Amino acid sequence: MRLNPPPRPRSLLAGLLAGAVVFAGSAFLLAPPGPARTDPAQANPAQADPAQADPAAGWPPRVAHVPDPPRLPVACGVRITVAASPEKYPAMADIAARFHRTSAGEHCGQVRVVKASSGDMFEALTTGTAGDIQVWSPAASGWTSLLRHRITRGQVADPDLEVVNVDRDGNLPAVTRTPLVLAMPKPIAERIGAVSWESVVGWAGDPQRWRLATGGAFGDFKLGKTDPTRSTSGLSSLLATYTAAAGHPVGATDLTDRRVRAKVSDVERAAMHYGDTTLTYLCHLAAVDAGAGGDAELAEQRVAAYVSAVPVEEQSVYLYNMGRQSDCESTHPQVPLVPVYPTDGTVWSDSPYAILNTATPAQHRLAGNFLRYLHDQDLAPGDEHPQTTFQADGFRDEARLELYPVAAAGAGGLRPRPELTAIGVPEPDVLDRVRESWQEVRKPARIIFLIDVSGSMLARAAPGRTRIAEVRRALREVVPTIAGRTEIGLWSFSGSKKDASLPRHSVVVAPTLDRARILDALDSLRPERRFDTALYDAVRAAHDQLGPGSAGHISAVVVLSDGKDDICPAGATCDPAKELRDLVTAVTFDDARPVRVFTVAYADAAAAELGRVALAAGGNAYDAGRDADGLERAIGDVISNF
């Protein structure tokens, strides 16, 4: 994972959010202040059935509700930017567009919605690189609590930064809600039954308990975990693990308790690798499922072999099972995921709506009006209810925690009213220490960067700069941010069709904890125009090198190439398709030798071939495009797996 991202020449937000922008105008010419909030059942007749609420049955769970602000007039020309977490960005952007259409001809206020991961925007606001943001809506309130904590302690670049719409109890308005669940392949979930976080701690710490629970049918216990410094599900699941390990709501003393930390470390060691988001796993699962070619039995075997459980938000399970995942190809899976609701509690993601003091008074009023609209207020006749839009993407209604009717009827595998106990989010100081403790309890990693130094890497990537120069620059930015417990190796590869005596790969630096050695060695990556691309041989060799002793580590080869394997000698008979199949077979992931391959396709790289290799090897494929920012971003995303 990445530590304290280095300063960028432009705002971090600009790099993160390229192309993820929607403009919307404000709603009606607003009347004088009205009631703070109407009853949600009145605002949305589709949810008005009194039978929907059953306090005696503990439904809906008690959650904090912050009254809406009054609606206020907004002058023409006022604009705000709302940074929304990725899982709700599509719905929020669509709602913002309707907000504009509703107000056509009334006034000129505009809402701009951008997509930003919660952890990345937290870092951007902390370091002063967020750009022009007036409203931040991360996935969960833990992030806004952390930001306010950092502000209080003077640990932000802008000493005047403030969240201005917190109520007297310290709460922020919620946009929508979804609980954290354990997503399990259906065959595993049906075999196991009820699950708790304590179960997860036990399975991770004692492999025999997992074998007894599953009858030995699904191999080792493999947990898909995301980076808690960037991902809400990663942070929430780390908090839930600490709570289960301690046996009570986590406090400061638990974070230094050797018994508690040992249990948390056991769970982290069960991680296959770390993803920057849960889509790392869900997209891979979708590809594994589709790769079975319609053979349901084979799909079950492959999906269950890939992962045992992934802590994700309930909403993500719905989209996966409905074949509606964003950012990757997906269809209705043959093997659905089951959202398992932990019996000892879970963490709710409440999508807080934080108005920052970067907003002018007029922008603050527009932000309040948009919040009202998100809560089904001030709708025009015939408008679709915004809360229904969120529900259609698998979220629960903000006020009543109800599912979309299709989901409530069973589509997507969700339970309308699961028995849920909320795991309390600790004080910000403790939550901050939980997040930071991950550096010490996380699974260590050993990786090899395998860099293409064929002749094509001398092509111009930018005025006065070659592709290899951009790679060296990106690695100089990224390597110092890699977690300290990660051993890093550096290899190069090229080869020659005409001269078989030339090496096809070279060990520049063997895996080491010494970052300075890696940085010093980058200058030795020097392509020559006569070099070709022995891609397949190099991947196989690096994979074989990491094989021995890989247990207990996240072991991975990170391949960066701008071309395709072209080492076949002139006049020889070669079968590139067979060579690719042979490589895929050689690196196919195996519990007995858990080495993964991650690929970065740069410029003219054969992205499809690299993707096949990464999929077979249990890793992931990234596309850097052709520019320097895309290259650094792709490499940064790759290392979030470690």
Image (cartoon, rainbow, N blue to C red):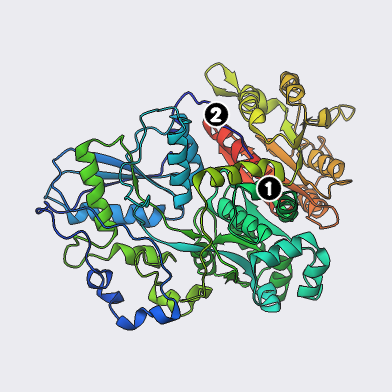
The residue lying at 64 percent from left, 40 percent from top is 1
In the picture, measured across the screen, residue 210 lies left or right of residue 348, that is right
Q: Amino acid at mark 1?
A: Glu
| Image quadrant in which you'd find residue 640 | top right
Q: Position of residue 269 (x, y in %)?
A: 75, 52
Q: In front: 574, or 625?
A: 625
Mark 2 Cα shell of 10 Å, populated few (<14), some (14-19), many (≥20):
some
Which residue is at the far top?
A: 464
Q: Position of residue 66 (x, y in %)?
A: 31, 57
Residue assigned mark 1: 609
Q: Residue 360: which numbered mark, if any?
A: none
The residue lying at 80 percent from left, 51 percent from top is 587
Q: Position of residue 519 (x, y in %)?
A: 71, 22
Q: Amino acid at mark 2?
A: Ala
Is the residue under label 2 in contact with that under label 1 (CB below 8 Å)?
A: no
Q: Earlier in the sequence, mark 1 or mark 2?
A: 1
From this view, report whether residue 162 is shown above or below residue 350.
above
Element assignment for label 1: helix
Q: In front: 479, or 333?
A: 479
In the picture, measured across the screen, residue 88 lies left or right of residue 464, that is left
Mark 1 Cα shell of 10 Å, populated few (<14), some (14-19), many (≥20):
some
Q: Residue 628: which numbered mark, if any?
A: 2
The answer to whether residue 117 is visible is no
In the picture, measured across the screen, residue 268 lies left or right of residue 370, that is right
Q: Tell me the quarter of the image containing the C terminus.
A: top right
Which residue is at the far left?
A: 32
Q: In front: 430, or 275?
A: 430
From this view, report whether residue 176 is shown above or below residue 406.
above
